[in-house]
Image (cartoon, rainbow, N blue to C red):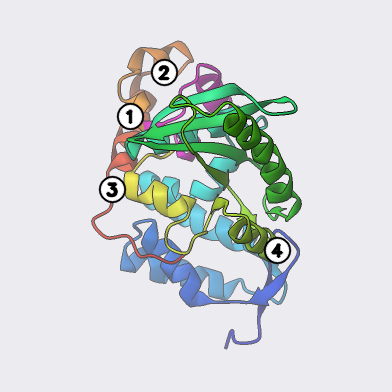
Amino acid sequence: MNQNIHVTKASGEKSLFSAEKIRRSLSRSGASDEQIELILKQISSQLYNGITTKKIYQIAFSILKGSGRHTAARYHLKQAIMELGPSGFPFEKYFAELLKNQGYSTQIGQIIQGRCVTHEIDIIAKKNDQLTMVECKYHNHPGIFCNVKIPLYIHARFEDIKAYRQKTASKHNPAFQVLIATNTRFSIDAVKYAICSNLELLGWDYPVNHGLKDLIDQSGLYPITCLTSLTRSEKQQLLDLKIVLCKELLSHEKTLKSIGVKSKRLITVLEEADKLCQIPEQVPNNK
């Protein structure tokens, strides 16, 4: 019945409606079979040709929020990452935390000398003898792709750094790899150029099954912007205090009180954060 219904993505692209894709996304968020069927029934009853993915998301999110805040919070992940803005710094700090969880030591906003000029590097990550220089490309609006200009520009910067390090080669200048991390997607040409130039890419769903969303789900390191029990203003106040992770809130009860979260709602916030940080036993790979 829904075979010829097209949905409109944030980028303006059209694609065929897929109930299975929504089912996988909901299952990934920890929704029960009963919740999934209820949501699909509601969406099906409101479908029309050209319906936006945003509208479909709102229907699902509303139902999830009414039956389980932490499940709704997990489903809200993609939008929550975009709420870390408008500046890219909270995303850099957040991504550095994800790297720390993988055993890396990290430094943010370091100035590195190149052959021609100096460069500010978003994150420098070290693990054993491996050195990774990370450039974060953050977007706070959906539908934006990282096009080929991004890896072209970053490649030029790191070639300048490499030239200087080779000129002053020593044990203090180990070889390094470059990682471009974004909360959105890469264009086909951006991926082609990165592969050709030996640049590592990490996007929302790239590499397949090993993208940003997979990294977050597998670690349970969700940003505070996921939480449905905090207002936008409260989230911003916490970000201003450099509190980015939900798990950090579990030891910052006094901070929550200081920004106006009191009594019963304080318990709700802490309970949602605690449940959200618990990694689901099984997370389907595709979303």
Q: Are marks 3 and 1 in contact (CB under 8 Å)?
A: no
Residue 251 spot, x, y in % from top left: 30, 20
Residue annotated with mark 1:
270
Residue 267 spot, x, y in % from top left: 31, 27
Q: CA distance from mark 3 to mark 2?
A: 24 Å
Residue annotated with mark 3:
279
Q: Residues within 10 Å of mark 1 (few under 14, many from 20)?
A: many
Tag 3: amino acid = Ile
Q: Are marks 3 and 4 in contact (CB under 8 Å)?
A: no
Mark 4 or 1: in front is 4
Tag 4: amino acid = Asp
Q: Is residue 283 above or below residue 67?
A: below
Viewed as shown, does residue 103 lie left or right of 145? left
User: Along the line of sight, which residue is nearer the eye, 223 or 70?
Assistant: 223
Upstream in sequence: badge 3 or badge 2: 2
Tag 2: amino acid = Leu
Mark 3 or 2: in front is 3
Q: Residues within 10 Å of mark 4 (few under 14, many from 20)?
A: some
On the question of residue 85 being in view, the answer is: no
Tag 1: amino acid = Leu
- Count the marks: how many? 4
Upstream in sequence: badge 3 or badge 1: 1
Magenta part of the chain: 223-246
Residue 218 spot, x, y in % from top left: 33, 50
Residue annotated with mark 2:
256
On the question of residue 242 being in view, the answer is: yes
